[in-house]
């Protein structure tokens, strides 16, 4: 039975798994390539930082609650020709969060709005932000119930804490009469507390949200806050679901993979 390795034991106690895993191989490489001690130490530190970054991204992605994962690299800008990647410039870096850059993706069903919103939120996670995904129906339903149960502040806080909030499918389904009353505080408080960005998808022209949310005045106020440092991007073209008749679209395949 071999004696315990004191270095391995120390690295375990310090919670440095990447260093534990890689230090023997890097030590051999350091000898072969005549690295200095600081260079060897830097390589070990970088290995641990990479592992921690990967772990943080994985944890933040799970907490976000995406129905599927889509990255910008996977998004088909060739098929969705109505939108150029360069138009997303302000939403691809840390300025999405630091600048409070909200975005409304508007267009008919099947154009990849949800996939694009998820890709932008995931990009923000990679940049160090937290995110949450929710459908508009789920958000309104939870907040209406929370208000009735006296749990309003707790439920509302769940939508204010994430640095990026994705609200999917605004206007796809009919809402009750209190829709605007519970959606407005989410938008307003995120706007007032550091202008935290929202990424929304909708198949309804934003100017028609008054009818969708049952309150024209509050809908105007919602849009006023969203567009102060944000914009509306309209998507047009063929549905992904009609891309190959008789075959599942790329988005449908992703959803099936998540369910499997």
Image (spheres, rainbow, N blue to C red):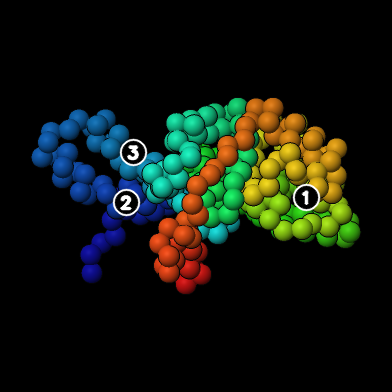
Left or right: residue 61 compared with residue 195: left
Residue 205, x across and y down, in percent: 68, 43
Kindly report which numbered mark, 3 or 2, lies closer to the viewer in this rendering: 3
Residue at the (10%, 40%) spot, across then down: 32
Mark 3–mark 2 CB contact (< 8 Å): no
Q: Quadrant of residue 86?
A: top left
Label placed on residue 46: 3
What residue is shown with label 1? 212
The one of 124 and 257 positioned closer to us in this rendering: 257
How packed mark 3 is, by other alpha carbons closer than 10 Å (few <14, some 14-19, many 20 or more), is: few
| Dot 2: element | helix
Q: How far apart, in angstroms, are the residues tagged by discs 3 and 1?
A: 51 Å
Residue at the (85%, 37%) spot, across then down: 217
Please tell me whether residue 226 is drawn above or below residue 105 in the rendered image. above
* Residue at the outermost bottom position: 260
Residue at the (84%, 41%) spot, across then down: 216
How packed mark 2 is, by other alpha carbons closer than 10 Å (few <14, some 14-19, many 20 or more), is: some
Please tell me whether residue 244 is drawn above or below residue 37 in the rendered image. below
């Amino acid at each position: 039975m071999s004696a315990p390795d004191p270095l391995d034991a120390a690295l375990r106690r310090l919670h440095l798994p990447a260093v534990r895993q890689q230090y023997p191989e890097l030590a051999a490489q350091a000898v072969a390539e005549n690295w200095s001690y600081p260079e060897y130490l830097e390589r070990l530190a970088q290995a641990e930082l990479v592992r921690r970054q990967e772990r943080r991204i994985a944890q933040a992605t799970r907490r976000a609650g995406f129905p599927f994962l889509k990255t910008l690299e996977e998004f088909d800008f060739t098929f969705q020709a109505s939108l150029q990647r360069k138009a997303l410039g302000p939403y691809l870096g840390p300025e999405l969060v630091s600048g409070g850059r909200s975005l409304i993706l508007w267009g008919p069903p099947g154009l990849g709005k949800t996939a694009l919103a998820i890709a932008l939120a995931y990009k923000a996670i990679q940049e160090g932000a937290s995110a949450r995904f929710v459908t508009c129906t789920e958000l309104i339903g939870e907040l209406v119930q929370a208000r009735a149960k006296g749990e309003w502040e707790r439920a509302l806080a769940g939508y204010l804490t994430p640095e990026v909030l994705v609200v999917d499918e605004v206007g796809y389904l009919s809402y009750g009469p209190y829709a605007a009353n519970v959606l407005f505080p989410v938008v307003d408080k995120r706007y007032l507390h550091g202008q935290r960005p929202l990424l929304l998808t909708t198949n309804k022209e934003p100017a028609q949200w008054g009818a969708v949310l049952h309150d024209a005045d509050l809908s105007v106020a919602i849009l006023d806050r969203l567009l102060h440092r944000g914009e509306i991007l309209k998507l047009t073209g063929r549905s992904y679901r009609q891309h190959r008749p008789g075959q599942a679209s790329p988005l449908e395949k992703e959803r099936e993979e998540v369910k499997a």
